């Protein structure tokens, strides 16, 4: 059982290790090359994500029918005319699925972006300035970690939701905490590096220090975290929509799952109305997780073996006491 | 730092969190543009009724006064009355919570037992086919939307194993006479199995991955090498030396995942028509019964805070090295 050592766990990822050793950061282009293209898992994930983005963009060209009118019998099984059958309103499922990708991905990317901006700002402010700002911001983050997120999101969505923009903002303002913690830890270590100290000593201002020295170092990790947040946001969209809190005027994958439930697709034996939207969501979440995970592993091999790695599995990051700073 | 200091610090933090949760609960529901009554939907909600309700709820007072009244009420355990049925929220919450508690306990225990088991095996046999299969299965369950997994189980599993699609008791009860205690319990359990399985499978994915990474780290430690050099059996190495230490992060993470468990239970109960707190919440959302929603959110939040606090203390007990 000699293979049970820490080094062998890391060794099968050598290309990634190079990219991550703090003093040999090969620049952002080198980072992309070693992390994303060096790992099959990342390539597969990225391909799937890009494919779905293309489907969303070219939805009108790919969809075979209009999604606003009845084009076949109710719950017609899959056939050459309707590849995935029809739903409880006689609308073509394949076209619905294709158009549904638009809202789902839009919510996923936009909400993750909002979370990235808020979390990034809080993390940089906290890590860079330290002192009471740090204490205050991290206390707030800690508290938000303990307040259960899904009930909170239901309540906020019940009060403010029912519009795609609102849902994006709600997800964004609730899920910035993990990003903030991660960025803060990274900024704290970057701030102590020699070149940052040197820049500071020759009188470089805060703004320039952050934008030229700190942000480029933090960016890859921030992006990796954002990719993982996309997966979470896509899930949350289906969650909010399923509870009847989605935008009633749009079609998303979450809406399709809700429709299949409300339309009793199960009782009608219409598997084609239930299975495809769930598979689509699962595949996108899986793909984003694969990409985000490979990026994080490459950037921080310690995550791969460390218990900190669990952070990405839907759970939020650990309490301050488990931070290894 | 001393034991007392640690406990004091965690207690203060928990109290602070409770305060924030209570305030958030007030701010979210009362400090809205318009107010909670405006959106209320029911059969006999006339303008007069709404004005009266507003007065009853004290919504015509200033926000600050309302906040003080709200805090005073909470201190006496008063969470207001529901908008629709005009019963105290506290009483309305208890029954569904009991049912939910039974269901999520079953699901969580299932996932912890299986998650720990496969997680440990996966870490011990890492890099092998067993490990890969287990990681990919867990990732798949982790990625699946909870409500959809529930639908899948209703569709593909329920009939095949002969378990009910939904509800909490057989529809015959009450019509064909009441069952004995034993039959009643069997019937309840049968209705609980599938919702619990759904929750359990999603959590199983999370927990396996958590346990696996915690174990991987522990198995890389020097004392594991020492244990092996001493000639200990694999069993002793894995469970006594490995898992005991890996348990620390696992305990914390399971406590932190409670928010997700409750959230997942809401959609699962909706899918299975299981009359727990989740279904009650969905119903309250539908009717815009914000008083009930507010009470439910508060109770759920407080219980999660409490569990996290317990986990904090447990963590201290498990790991005497914890200092900060």
Image (cartoon, coloured by chain):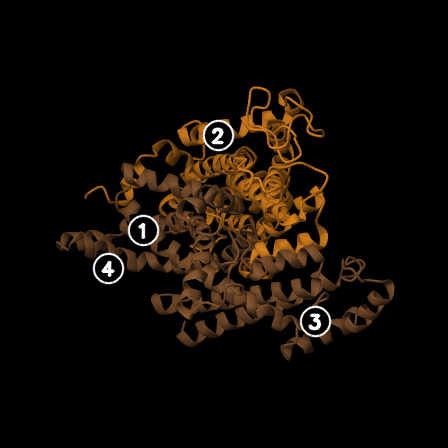
Left or right? Give the position of A17 relative to A94.
left
Left or right? Give the position of B42 relative to B15.
right
Chain letter for the part of the structure drawn in brown: B
Disc 1 crowd rating (10 Å Cα; few below 14, some 14-19, many 20+) is: many
Instruction: Pick whichever of labels 4 and 3 is earlier in the sequence.
Output: 3
- Residue A130 seen from this side: no
Disc 4 crowd rating (10 Å Cα; few below 14, some 14-19, many 20+) is: few
Instruction: Pick whichever of labels 4 and 1 is earlier in the sequence.
Output: 1
**Discs 2 and 3 share one subunit:** no
Q: Which residue is mark 2?
A: A32
| Distance Cα–Cα, label 4 vs label 3 | 52 Å
Q: Which residue is mark 3?
A: B81
User: Which residue appears at 67% of the width and 48% of the height?
Assistant: A245
Compare residues A201 and B57 and report the one nearer the observer.
Answer: B57
- The answer to whether mark 4 and mark 1 are in CB contact below 8 A is no
Q: Which residue is mark 4?
A: B240
């Amino acid at each position: 059982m000699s293979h049970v050592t820490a080094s062998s766990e890391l060794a099968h990822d050598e290309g990634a290790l190079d990219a991550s050793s703090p003093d040999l950061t090969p620049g952002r282009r080198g980072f992309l090359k070693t992390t994303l293209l060096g790992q099959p898992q990342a390539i597969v994930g990225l391909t799937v994500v890009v494919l779905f983005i293309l489907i969303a963009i070219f939805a009108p060209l790919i969809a075979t029918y209009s999604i606003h009118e009845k084009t076949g019998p109710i719950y017609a099984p899959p056939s050459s005319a309707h590849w995935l059958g029809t739903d409880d309103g006689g609308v073509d499922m394949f076209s619905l699925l294709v158009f549904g990708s638009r809202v789902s991905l839009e919510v996923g990317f936009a909400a993750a972006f909002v979370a990235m901006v808020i979390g990034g700002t809080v993390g940089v402010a906290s890590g860079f300035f330290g002192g009471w700002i740090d204490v205050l911001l991290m206390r707030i983050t800690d508290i938000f970690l303990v307040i259960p997120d899904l009930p909170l999101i239901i309540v906020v969505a019940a009060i403010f939701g029912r519009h795609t923009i609102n849902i994006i903002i709600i997800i964004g303002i609730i899920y910035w905490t993990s990003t903030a913690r991660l960025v803060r830890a990274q900024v704290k270590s970057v701030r102590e590096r020699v070149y940052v100290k040197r820049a500071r000593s020759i009188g470089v201002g805060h703004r320039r220090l952050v934008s030229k020295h700190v942000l480029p170092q933090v960016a890859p990790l921030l992006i990796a975290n954002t990719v993982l947040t996309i997966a979470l946001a896509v899930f949350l969209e289906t969650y909010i929509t399923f509870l009847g809190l989605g935008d009633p005027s749009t079609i998303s994958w979450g809406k399709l799952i809700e429709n299949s439930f409300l339309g009793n697709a199960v009782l009608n034996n219409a598997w084609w109305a239930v299975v495809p939207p769930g598979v689509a969501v699962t595949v996108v979440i899986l793909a984003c997780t694969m990409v985000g995970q490979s990026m994080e592993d490459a950037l921080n091999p310690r995550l791969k073996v460390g218990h900190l790695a669990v952070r990405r599995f839907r759970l939020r990051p650990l309490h301050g006491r488990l931070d290894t700073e | 730092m001393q034991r007392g200091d640690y406990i004091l610090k965690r207690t203060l933090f928990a109290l602070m969190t409770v305060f924030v949760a209570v305030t958030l609960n007030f701010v979210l529901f009362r400090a809205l543009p318009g107010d909670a009554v405006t959106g209320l939907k029911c059969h006999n909600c006339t303008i007069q009724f709404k004005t009266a309700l507003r007065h009853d709820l004290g919504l015509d007072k200033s926000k600050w006064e309302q906040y003080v009244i709200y805090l005073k009420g909470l201190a006496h355990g008063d969470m207001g009355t529901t908008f629709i049925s005009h019963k105290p929220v506290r009483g309305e919450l208890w029954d569904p919570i009991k049912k939910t508690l039974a269901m999520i306990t079953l699901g969580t225990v299932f996932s912890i037992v299986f998650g720990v088991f496969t997680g440990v095996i996966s870490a011990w046999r890492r890099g092998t086919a067993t490990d890969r299969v287990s990681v990919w299965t867990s990732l798949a369950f982790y990625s699946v939307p909870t409500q959809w997994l529930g639908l899948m189980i209703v569709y593909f599993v329920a009939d095949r194993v002969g378990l009910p699609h939904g509800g909490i008791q057989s529809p015959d009860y009450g019509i064909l006479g009441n069952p004995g205690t034993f039959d009643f319990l069997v019937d309840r359990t049968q209705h609980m199995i599938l919702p619990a399985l759904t929750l359990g499978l999603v959590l199983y994915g999370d927990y396996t991955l958590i346990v696996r990474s915690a174990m991987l780290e522990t198995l890389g430690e020097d004392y594991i090498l020492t244990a092996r050099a001493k000639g200990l059996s694999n069993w002793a190495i894995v469970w006594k030396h490995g898992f005991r230490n890996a348990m620390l992060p696992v305990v914390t993470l399971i406590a932190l995942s409670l928010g997700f468990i409750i959230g997942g239970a809401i959609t699962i109960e909706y899918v299975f028509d299981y009359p727990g707190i989740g279904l009650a919440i969905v119903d309250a959302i539908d009717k815009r019964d914000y008083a009930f929603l507010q009470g439910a959110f508060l109770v759920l939040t407080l219980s999660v805070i409490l569990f996290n606090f317990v986990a904090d203390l447990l963590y201290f007990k498990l790991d005497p090295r914890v200092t900060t």
